[in-house]
Image (spheres, rainbow, N blue to C red):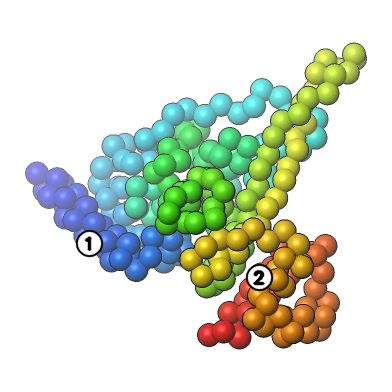
Amino acid sequence: MILRILALLSLTLISHIEKAFTQSTSEDSILRRSAYQHTAVFYYEQLGDQTVLNNGSRYEKYPRPFRLGSAYFLTDQFTTGSVVYDGLFFDSVSLLFDDLQQLLVLRKDGYDLQLVSERISAFTISGHEFLRLNADSAHPGIPGTRFYEVLYSGPSRILKLTDKTIQEEAFLTEGIPKYMVTRDDYYMKWGKVYVQVNSKDRLLELLKDHKKEIRRFIEKNQLGWEDKEILLVRVAGYYDQLVK
């Protein structure tokens, strides 16, 4: 009876805290969620196996490696990360991100569980932060509902969209090996709209109200599109300083 009361109190507290975050913004950094981490962990420990993190199906890895490329983000090995699942923040959990299928996989008690994507709002893995955004009126310009890597989280947010597809090649001696084709696209939040930015010229066109300052900043810091992620992050940060 006492355990049920404690669990109910924990859920009530989580609900109030989560509402406070939601009123601020639905896309707060996963680090902001750590304010109620201990409450979530308390609830997690009290309910034992009957936790939200057990809501998922068993995940099976690919039967053989690809000839080129990988289906996973950075590595096919589990690494320590954190996830916001059903509004609860869970830290120091073992995660693997299959970005080919857009699946976040949790290793728990020797089992690999693919979490329900719709119940994930954010996660971090290997120091990289991801948000799940819906392609709806709340996120105009977003090309599809999926996980986006957050490269820069300021007002002019920079998102990275990685799309992977499988191709096959026929070799008489090797059967039909498969390889991965990867495409990266980048989006900047311009006001309330996300705009695709896949070239330096497009970036300068978007920030035309401070185009001269941005151009000088790029030249001074020797930023080129060959290091596009560094360029986008630094320019977005500089632009936010100019307009604040």
Identity of the residue drawn at 71% across and 30% down: 166
Q: Which mark is residue 206?
A: 2
Which quarter of the figure has residue 51?
Answer: top left
Disc 1 or 2, which lies upstream in sequence? 1
Q: Quadrant of the N terminus?
A: top left
How many neighbours does mark 1 have within 10 angstroms: few (below 14), some (14-19), or many (20 or more)? few
Q: Which secondary structure, mark 1?
A: helix
Amino acid at circle 1:
His
Image coordinates for residue 208, horizontal then vertical, percent = 68, 77
Residue beneath the point at 30% across and 66% down: 23
Q: How far is mark 1 from mark 2, CA to CA?
A: 39 Å
Camera sees residue 128 = no
Q: Amino acid at mark 2?
A: Leu
Can you identify the residue that label 1 sits on? 16
Above or below: residue 221 compared with residue 65: below
- Taking the spot 64% from the left edge, 81% from the top edge, the residue there is 209
Q: Considering depth in this image, is 225 or 110 the residue closer to the camera?
A: 225
